[in-house]
Amino acid sequence: MIPPVSIRRYLEVEATPQRAAEIDRIFYESSNTKSFESEDVKAAFRERWLGRYLRHDARFAYVAQIEGGTIVGYLVGATDDPAKTARFADIAYFAELENYTRRFPAHLHVNVRADFRNHGIGAQLIRRFVDDAQRMGVPGVHVVTSADAANVSFYNRNGFAEVARAGRLDSLVFLGCPL
């Protein structure tokens, strides 16, 4: 049994080196990329999939915490169309998916510490983001993941369905959730 978990806005959590380290640990633990050519490459990877969200879209970042404040999961997201937003121009597949990002402009990245997975924490984080996006009048939310990834079924259980494929040999799946 896991201890009770509370979902909070990232901006409401005291910014400490420990909290930043907890988020980074979860980020790298959850990533499919485990080795990097250099520290610069590792830092660029973090910036691409986590850092820019914490800097530019912190109001759409949430953390899952247990008693004592330890972060065991997080979600970062954005509500503007990534195919039309300059800060996401480095992610090539968004241009390929432009016809779909109009209907599902908001997107997210959610990760939970391995020992806290399968307890509904990721679903709670998604629900919080989706509720906030819906209140803002956003028409839909999407995620892009590997077509053969285990997380596809997780997203399906949380209201996302396959809308399109992209990438080399359709290796990526665009999953949308209408709001």
Image: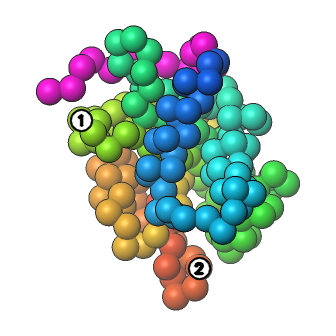
Q: Secondary structure at mark 2?
A: loop
Residue 17 appearing in the image: yes
Q: Secondary structure at mark 1?
A: loop
Q: Position of residue 65 (x, y in %)?
A: 41, 21
Q: Residue at x 46, y 41 (%)?
A: 26
Q: Please check the rendered image and state whether residue 3 is part of the magenta-colored stretch, yes or no.
A: yes
First reached walking from the N terminus: tag 2 or tag 1? 1
Here the colouring is rainbow
Q: Is residue 48 above or below residue 112?
A: below
CB within 8 Å, label 2 to label 1 = no
What residue range appears in magenta?
1-14
Q: Position of residue 124 (x, y in %)?
A: 37, 31
Q: Residue at x 33, y 33 (%)?
A: 121
Q: Quarter of the image holding residue 72?
A: top left
- Horizontal side of 63 relative to 103 (left or right) equals left
Q: Residue at x 37, y 67 (%)?
A: 149
